[in-house]
Amino acid sequence: MVKIWIDADAAPRDVKEIIFRAARRLKVDTILVANQPLGLPPNASMVSSVTVSEGANEADKYIVEHAEVGDIVITADIPLAALLVEKSVDAIDPRGEKYTADNIRTRLSVRDFMDDMRGAGAVTGGSRPYDEKDKKAFAATFDSTLTRALRKH
């Protein structure tokens, strides 16, 4: 059975709302994983949460350990996405990009380069604000990925 996993510490509210609506409508188990307790949406019995211990990458470790082929994971964490792609688990960025074997190495390289630049004192800025275009891109990618996963199972 398909499960949706959300790396929930930093997932945008709009992304969670899109997923919650799909979980209710399609009766798909959805698990929020975070370092702190999270509120669950009303009328969504298919949505649950897991609170992991404080510490770097604890939520990531939990998701990698429990997500299976056929599941979908929502995360902006590129190293986590790389581990999921390696396991053949579908992973989607909240801005709508699906992580694949073809794009994950480039994403990791850019991430590492930016980390090095910040470590050297360069001001690199942050991500641009999440906007309506990102929300629509996520909704489209999520819908097609979920539809394909449900057809397989």
Image (cartoon, rainbow, N blue to C red):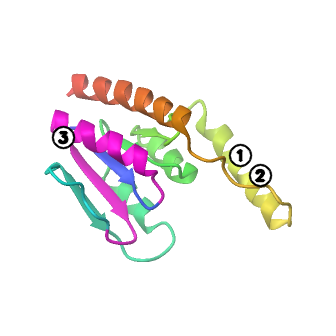
Q: Nearer the viewer, mark 1 or mark 3?
A: 3
Question: Which mark is first along the chain, 2 or 3?
Answer: 3
Give the magenta range. Answer: 10-37
Residue marked by disc 2: 113
**Residue beneath the point at 38% across and 76% down:** 53
Q: Amino acid at mark 1?
A: Ser
| Marks 3/2: CA–CA distance | 40 Å
Residue 16 vs 149, above or below: the answer is below
Query: In the rendered structure, does residue 153 fall within the stretch colored magenta?
Result: no
Residue at 47% of width from left, 30% of height from top?
A: 136
Q: CA distance from mark 1 to mark 3?
A: 37 Å
Q: Secondary structure at mark 2?
A: helix
Q: Position of residue 148 (x, y in %)?
A: 31, 23
To which residue does mark 3 refer?
A: 24
Lateral position of residue 87 relative to residue 1, left or right: right
Q: Is residue 14 magenta?
A: yes
Three-letter code, disc 3: Arg
Identify the residue at image location x=43%, y=28%: 141
Residue bearing mark 1? 109
Say if mark 2 contacts mark 1, CB within 8 Å. yes
Looking at this view, is 137 or 97 the one in front? 137
Q: Nearer the viewer, mark 3 or mark 2?
A: 3
